Amino acid sequence: MKMLGISLIALLAATPALAQDDDIVVTASGIEQPRDEVGQAVTVIDADTIRTRQAVDVVDLLATTPGVRFSRNGSTGGVTGVSLRGAETTQTLVLIDGVKVNDPSGIGDGYDFGHLLTGNIRRIEVLRGSNSIVYGSQAIGGVVNVMTGAPSEGFAVNASADYGYSDTLNAKADVSGTRGAVSGGVGVAYFNTDGISSVGRSFGGVEKDGYENIATNAKLKIAFSDTLSLDLRGYYIHADLDYDSFFGAPADSSDVSKLDQYVGYAGMNLALLDGKLTNRAAVTWLRNDRDYYFVRGTDPDYGYSGTNLRFEYEGVYAPVDQAKLIFGYEHERPDYDYFGFGDIASAKANIDSVYALAVVKPLTGLAVTGGLRHDDHSQFGGATTFGANANYTPNAGATNIRLSYGEGFKAPSLYQLYDTYSGNSALRPERSKSYDIGFDQSLDGDKAMLSLTAFQRDTRNQINYDYATYTYGNLDRTRARGVEATLTLKPVEALTVAASYSYVDARDRSGGATDGNRLPRRAANAVSLSADYLWSFGLSTGATLTMVGDSYDDTANTRQLDGYGLAGLRASFPVGEHLEVYGRIDNLFDADYATAYGYGTYGRSAYGGVRVRF
């Protein structure tokens, strides 16, 4: 990895970067903002990138962005966690079409990315750094905001299907349109594979673990007038996974898990005072049902159900172009149920939150944002967080200098509070402070952009299992610091090159036997390089190279996960106006690697398919 660092320096020196096509982001403050108004680090993965890369898992796209580390337990569909800037995977807040989808029935309220496939997803925004002002609990590492496509003007149909390694079928379709005051769309995606053994090849895994995933999405918007509209959204995932649940030495097993995830949003939008005051009131709903079977075809042996019902009000008052005030109130009620092994358990909580955020532009080119939030939890009481950031551009966006300070908190999960055997009702929320400084530089008429960010985050009262008391406790303190760099280049219209690098030094600062150790499954170094070229006769070819450094699988830093490099190739070719054929090869050099000890990963695999658009 020393050589990787040297190579990165050479890459930074030799490769300029491409300006983002998307100049508007929504994740920083919860409303649409131009990039040069945002002082936080945000990466956008747009529809063109998702289509061009041909990735199936959302996490494979996230892995090419700076500051992201992930671990997957075996094949597609296996439990997958995403860490932002070295934070715990349970400290990543996830939104799907504006709905918070972190699982209230999980041990730490984390989100399992294993079942989130690209399907009909059209945009992903990744905000790095603590940001509880807008999002409340869990936004300690940052926020991953996943969005399906907006309804098209007129009428549009998109469909694709591909087939490949391990009898894998991946198909999806969506229909959308607008007529008068009504716009909407529906989509469905289907994925089925024989998979690979969840137990790694080097551990003797031979039995393939199959996986099926069905995802549907829908949107409907009705504009009753220029100032009043109704917004409805829905997302559903059904997943069926064979997996290997092993204790001690890894070994094949017959375990099965099934998931049903329901996501719903119903909101009203009202503009007042000639549009200077906009109001949004919404009800959102999440339900996660997870059942586990030791043997397929039997009744479930144990299972979890988590729901979260939320009410949200958000107002935006912009009396002048140079100032706006964002304020809101939220009420949520997380609820979880458990059954299994002759036991049942249930718990719920109520959280009420108020927040206010001001965005002002006192000088030309300078945008300053600051805000405050208070959350009142029915179990542990209140938590107040503060955040502020600034963006200064002296040349109308060609250069952006960014500063950011954010506080985060994470409420103890219902499992950690109320589990019969290990719960601790005296737990306090996890707290964090995050600092950023960075700049973005556009070069040569937006043909190139360089972005650099340095960060540090300190977390205290982090919850972990206490083996002395056999309960959860506020045991840990951690620190993460590092550097992120992104570069993209478009020297000619036909060629796009994108690169990212991040150094993340995430360590235990709890003062015990593991003080100073690296946090598990968080490699210090990671670099990604992608290039795509559109030939004059219509053929598009591309490649992605990802390199990840060594890490450890345990807190004692005694079990090492070796670093690895992955290469992939892709191509697509239009056949007429509406048809396109495409294909890809993943893990071109058949690297044997692991992101979690004992679990398998895909070797070299190839896929091909067709797309149609009308």
Image: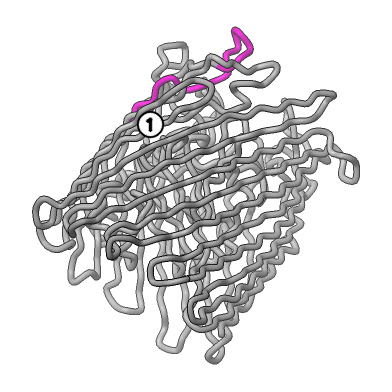
Image quarter of the C terminus:
bottom right
Residue 249: quarter of image: top right
Residue 369 in percent (x, y) is at 23, 45
Main secondary-structure element of the magenta-colored stretch: strand
- Tell me the residue at 62%/48% (across/down): 114
Q: Position of residue 84 (x, y in %)?
A: 43, 41
The residue tagged with tag 1: helix, strand or loop? strand
Q: Tell me the residue that label 1 is attached to.
A: 374
Q: In x, y percent, where is residue 158? A: 58, 77
Amino acid at circle 1: His
Out of 402 and 514, give the one closest to the viewer. Answer: 402
Magenta-drawn stretch contains 471: yes
Q: Is residue 59 visible?
A: yes
Q: Give the residue displayed 64% in from the left and 21% down from the top.
A: 418
Q: Is residue 436 visible?
A: no
Tell me, yes or no, whether the highlighted magenta stretch contains residue 275: no
Foreground pick, 318 / 448: 318
Direction from residue 535 to residue 57 in the image, left or right? right
The vertical placement of 603 against 205, above or below, is below
x 24%, y 52%: residue: 324
Q: Which residues are magenta?
A: 457-472
Residue 99 image position (x, y, % from top left): 52, 50
Q: Residues within 10 Å of mark 1 (few under 14, many from 20)?
A: some
Q: Quadrant of residue 466?
A: top right
Question: Would you say 400 lies left or right of 556 here?
Answer: left
Question: Please, which residue is most extreme toward the front here?
Answer: 273
**Residue extending furthest right?**
298
Q: Give the residue drawn at x 35%, y 74%.
A: 495
